[in-house]
């Protein structure tokens, strides 16, 4: 652009020296370097012809090159963006048993980061891309209104195992929860509630779990006041990854080695090193179960240990 401006300025100055006024000089320069060439203005002398030839040789190539670069840049950006979108969509179409995340604000990005660290496949849905386009590895996104069925299906909701609804609007969260439950009855739905009064409505709409970020943030800050060291330790263990201890879930199936056996008889602590913190039975939790506690099919064991210990616990639960 700078070189083109210099050529136009030089051409205009040259034609002014050759006797044209400023407007005619600009006009003659532009039609010459653009190869339009309607007609020559002014007295056609030898010097006029030589200058015009030189201007054509240097100016035409410059103008055409500049125009070509501008067009290439514009279309390359658009085509590249479209190509990347199509490529990403093909990858989404191949996903199965993944997580659909509606809402890609600050909360949504934090959710995606944690899920990707855990090895989950995530498809985010939002009506626009964030201004900061530095995405983590494994990022997938569908642009559109998450309240539209077609957008949810484009994200693979009918093949997903979990839906996380994290929009700013409780009304939208409620609508998406209701719609998604109809599109995929077996979906596990986690919904965000910005107001406490919305929590029972989301549950009635089909949400399996409802989270209020304000309540969690308040409880976290209160815990830091009352028990700062304990709260910080739990935060480090669960989120920072500095410790190798993790929380895991193990389901007791009808064919499991744990089914209809007591905690003491299973010898979990001795064989795996993992600790059973709680047992979820239906909607109830049995915290710190005693050795005589008998596991039933459908129980979910909430366990604490290293990743290897949790895997060993899962393996033991499958043995018969």
Image: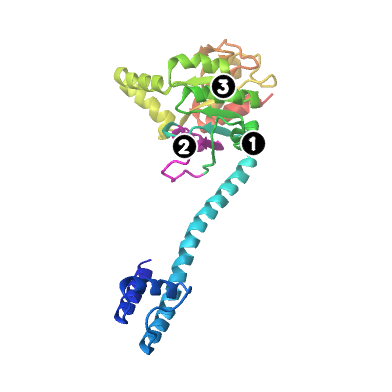
Regarding mark 1 in the picture, which secondary structure is present there?
Answer: loop
Provide residue 248's location: percent of width, then percent of height: 53, 26
Q: Is residue 147 magenta?
A: no
Q: Residue at x 55, y 54 (%)?
A: 79
Q: Closer to us: mark 2 or mark 3?
A: 2
Q: Which residue is mark 2?
A: 113
Q: Are marks 3 and 1 in contact (CB under 8 Å)?
A: no
**Badge 3 or badge 1: first in the primary sequence:** 1
**Badge 2 or badge 3: first in the primary sequence:** 2
Which range of residues does the magenta coloring cover? 108-137
Query: How far is mark 2 from mark 3, CA to CA?
Result: 32 Å
Q: Closer to us: mark 3 or mark 1?
A: 1
Q: Which numbered dot is residue 268?
A: 3
As drawn, 237 above or below 262: below
Along the horizontal axis of the image, is 299 left or right of 52? right
Q: Which residue is mark 1?
A: 96
């Amino acid at each position: 652009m700078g070189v083109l401006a210099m050529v136009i300025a030089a051409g205009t100055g040259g034609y002014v020296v050759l006797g044209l006024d400023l407007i005619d000089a600009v006009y003659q320069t532009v039609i010459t370097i653009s190869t339009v060439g309607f007609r020559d203005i002014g007295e056609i002398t030898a010097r006029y012809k030589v200058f015009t030839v030189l201007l054509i040789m240097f100016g035409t190539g410059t103008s055409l090159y500049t125009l070509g670069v501008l067009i290439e840049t514009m279309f390359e950006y658009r085509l590249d963006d479209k190509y990347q979108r199509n490529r990403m969509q093909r990858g989404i179409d191949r996903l199965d048993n993944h997580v659909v995340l509606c809402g890609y604000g600050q909360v949504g990005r934090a959710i995606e980061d944690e899920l990707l660290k855990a090895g989950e496949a995530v498809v985010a849905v939002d009506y626009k891309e964030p201004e900061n386009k530095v995405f983590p590895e494994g990022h997938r996104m569908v642009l559109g209104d998450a309240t539209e069925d077609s957008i949810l299906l484009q994200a693979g909701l009918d093949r997903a195992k979990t839906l996380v609804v994290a929009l700013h609007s409780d009304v939208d969260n409620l609508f998406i929860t209701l719609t998604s439950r109809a599109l995929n009855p077996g979906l596990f739905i986690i919904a965000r509630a910005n107001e406490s009064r919305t929590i029972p409505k989301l549950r009635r709409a089909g949400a399996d779990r409802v989270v209020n970020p304000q309540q969690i943030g308040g409880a976290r800050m209160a815990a830091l006041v009352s028990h700062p060291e304990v709260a910080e330790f739990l935060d480090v263990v669960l989120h920072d990854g500095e410790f190798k201890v993790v929380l895991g879930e193990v389901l007791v199936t009808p064919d499991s080695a744990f089914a209809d056996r007591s905690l003491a008889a299973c010898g979990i602590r001795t064989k795996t090193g993992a600790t059973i913190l709680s047992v979820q039975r239906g909607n109830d939790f049995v915290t710190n179960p005693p050795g005589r506690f008998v596991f039933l099919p459908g129980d979910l064991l909430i366990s604490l240990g290293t990743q290897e210990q949790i895997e060993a616990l899962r393996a033991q639960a499958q043995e018969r």
